Image (cartoon, rainbow, N blue to C red):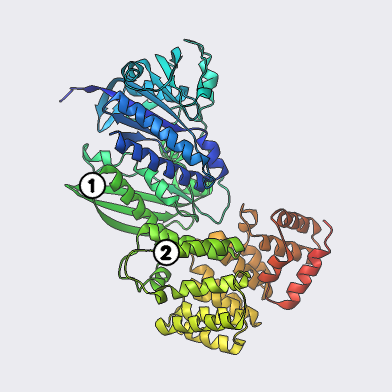
Amino acid sequence: MNTEVDRKIAVILVADVVGYSKHMERDENATLKAYAECEKLLKTCLKKYKGSIFNTAGDSALAEFPSAVNAVECGVAFQNDIKKRNESDKTEVKLEFRIGINMGDVVKKEGNLFGDGVNIAARLEALAQPNGISISKSVYDLVVPKTKMTFNDLGVQKVKQNEFHAFDILLDPSQKRTLKTKSSSMLPILGAVAVALVVMVGVFYFSKSEEVTTKKGVISSKPLVFVSSIDSSRLSDDDKKYVEGITGNVISSLSKSKSIRLVPTKTVQSFEKNEISSEQLFKTHGIKFLVSSSLQIVDSDARVNIEISDLEKKQIVISSIKDLKLTSIFEFQDKFGESILSEFLVNILNQKGLYESYFSWRETPISTQQLVQYVNFRSEMGKWTEEGFVNASTILSEMKKWPGPSKPEDWLVQDTWLNFYGMAKKKIPINQDNLKKLKRELDKTIEIKPSPENYASRAFLSLGMQMINCKEAFQDLELAHRKAGNADSYGHASFVYGRCGDSKKAAENARNAFDLLQVDTNWRATTRLAFRLYEDNQIEEMYSLLERVTEAVDIPVSILALLAYDKLKNGDEEAAKYYFSKAKANRYSKNILAQAIYNKDIRDDAITTLDSFKY
């Protein structure tokens, strides 16, 4: 048995986000997206200064450097990059980092580093100020004669069991501070850190005092996704290095989608450590999808096995195999994350058949990043606001720059819908020339591809702009649904039948569209079905549909108004007051309700009733 311990002297940099948990509580998706942007800045600095990450913990990273000077210059460059990012008006979530740098004795095991050299770097990170860098004396002695940086001597500090002489790098004069030496008074400072870094056998765990979140997850149209740690049991010790940080990378990739919420990496680690069952993940924590994956490596080839389970339905919805090439660790991790994101975008967040239908003309396969743009384009179109129109226009302009051959008519479907959107929101004039152009575009889409969604689109948009009558619109719908349609075509048909007074067929088509969606982004299909059921006097089924939605954090204003109206009609003023006050708090207006209700009698009565409601 080989008992030799692989020891060496290493320069270790630890970087950690300040107040990460609070950012996640405010907006998980935005925070994950922001962290992914910061992570990219860090990787750029690491590449320039020859640093390499050997461990991560969701919101923190540990890196090794060949020299102390390189580590310090990388830390300073990264903090400067973060400062520039935070000063930009375009930055939605402004993350701050603490950095600790130490040089000391470490032990290398299975591609990871641990020991006092790493522990003290972690303590220095905890000691550092937000946007600051703290270094040990061993690093200070090497870099002070070789740099022009300003340092502040903090004296000897004792944090937990570690005692060390620390210095701040003063990136700004305001960072100068005085700390008591060798004192337990450091504990209040450390208490401000959300999670202390504890390095145990090369893996980051929660400290014992940290409470595991057990409360029920919030109800939202954006499903909660749990990305489990990758199964590396079949890998050799050498190949396990590819697994380090891969879960965090997958979460960063999935955060690019605006249609899902993600369980933070540290919570994933805690749940796995406590062996939380799949049933508990759904029932107790509201987690909808579980992503599991395993990795096989042979020479320079890797095979990724991906399995995505719907915990609510207790079934596997995706099981696929991806073959990837092993290049650099970071490039491999990026491709791994994109593989899982692609599965979500194509097979869960958007129907695969629908996606293939709209882009079957492309000779060059669409990348995951391009698919993100397309899904976000649809999301902006679905908002049905002036802001949504502007955002969708911007995204479509970027989509038209995709590499590969394309002709103007290839984008005709998207252009046509955007023109209709613009006219509906009075961003484009509604005149004879623009209406004739819209009709030509709709006819051309069917000439190019007579698909269900193109026939149904022509019926929807032509009727919406009063260019055809109901009989002509019905003819297009018959052509659309000679065979099975898709979520888009059934949704458009629901509009046409509803506007033309056939509440039964409107509800039937709305149900078809709803049933075809794995994920109902922003409750759009749910809202459409609820109103069509109400107009068809299927009130009990409507309430059954909305049972979970009524307490959702992102419940549509129109649903709240509809419920308030129905409760008033049935004499339940308390319930009506509850729903209508929530609607008012979320910017209720008559127009919102008027657009959602197609039956004129119900619409007029609902608006009048709510206008006169004194709550």
The image shows residue 536 at horizontal and vertical percentages of 66, 76
Q: How many marks?
A: 2
- Answer above or below: position of 104 versus 350: above
Q: Quadrant of residue 465?
A: bottom right
Helix, strand or loop at label 1? It is loop
The tag earlier along the polypeptide, 2 or 1, is 1
What's the residue at 40%, 62% (across, down)?
346
The residue wearing badge 2 is: 399
Three-letter code for the amino acid on which mark 1 is drawn? Thr
Callout 1: few (<14), some (14-19), or many (20+) C-alpha neighbours within 10 Å?
few
CB under 8 Å between discs 2 and 1: no
Side of 130 where 608 appears, left or right: right
The image shows residue 486 at horizontal and vertical percentages of 47, 74
The image shows residue 6 at horizontal and vertical percentages of 21, 24
Three-letter code for the amino acid on which mark 2 is drawn? Met
Helix, strand or loop at label 2? It is helix
